[in-house]
Image: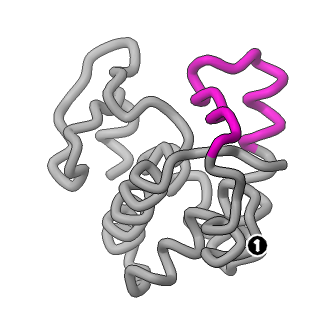
Amino acid sequence: MIIMMSEERVKGMAKRLRKVLRGCGVELKHFACLELAVRLCGFEDWQNYRRRDVDAPLSLLDDDLWEEEFAARDEFQMSVLEEAGLGAVARELLDRANPTGSWAKQTSGPTFRDNSDERGHSLSFADNLAQ
């Protein structure tokens, strides 16, 4: 599965992944998070991502996918995190960093600002309790 994202978006994803991982007690260097970000997009590594067809259309964000497409993407990204040795924090990492979703959209229900998220991504009440 290849998920085409702009380089700017992938770099932002790496920053959010690093921040959420740090909150989960996992320290990774920025380049390791860049590698993880491109692997979550289906690329083997940063160099392969850089060699992508930059004229190819960008992929839809999670919020714009049909339920079945989203489920397949989520399963793929969970497997990438498990292969990277991050299985214990995989679900929380995907939910909080939202690597291929819309960072600005709020979840339904009561929301609170997650101060660890540099973009102010809102979480549901249950997500805030889990922090």
In the picture, measured across the screen, residue 92 lies left or right of residue 131, that is: right
Give percent across and percent down for residue 121.
28, 36
Quadrant position of residue 107: top left
Q: Secondary structure at mark 1?
A: loop
In the picture, measured across the screen, residue 78 lies left or right of residue 7, that is: right
Q: How many C-alpha atoms fall within 10 Å of the one at disc 1: few (<14), some, or many (≥20)? A: few
At x 38% / y 38%, what residue is drawn? Answer: 127
- Is 51 above or below relative to 13? below
Front one among 39 and 89:
39
Residue 125 seen from this side: no
Front one among 106 and 128:
106
Residue designated by label 1: 44
Stretch of the chain drawn in magenta: 55-74
At x 62% / y 49%, what residue is drawn? Answer: 54
Three-letter residue code for mark 1: Glu
Front one among 91 and 56:
56
Q: Is residue 64 magenta?
A: yes
Give percent across and percent down for residue 2.
78, 49
Front one among 117 and 5:
5
**Farthest front residue in view:** 55
Residue 65 seen from this side: yes
- Is 71 above or below relative to 107? below
Q: Is residue 68 magenta?
A: yes
At x 74% / y 64%, what residue is drawn? Answer: 43
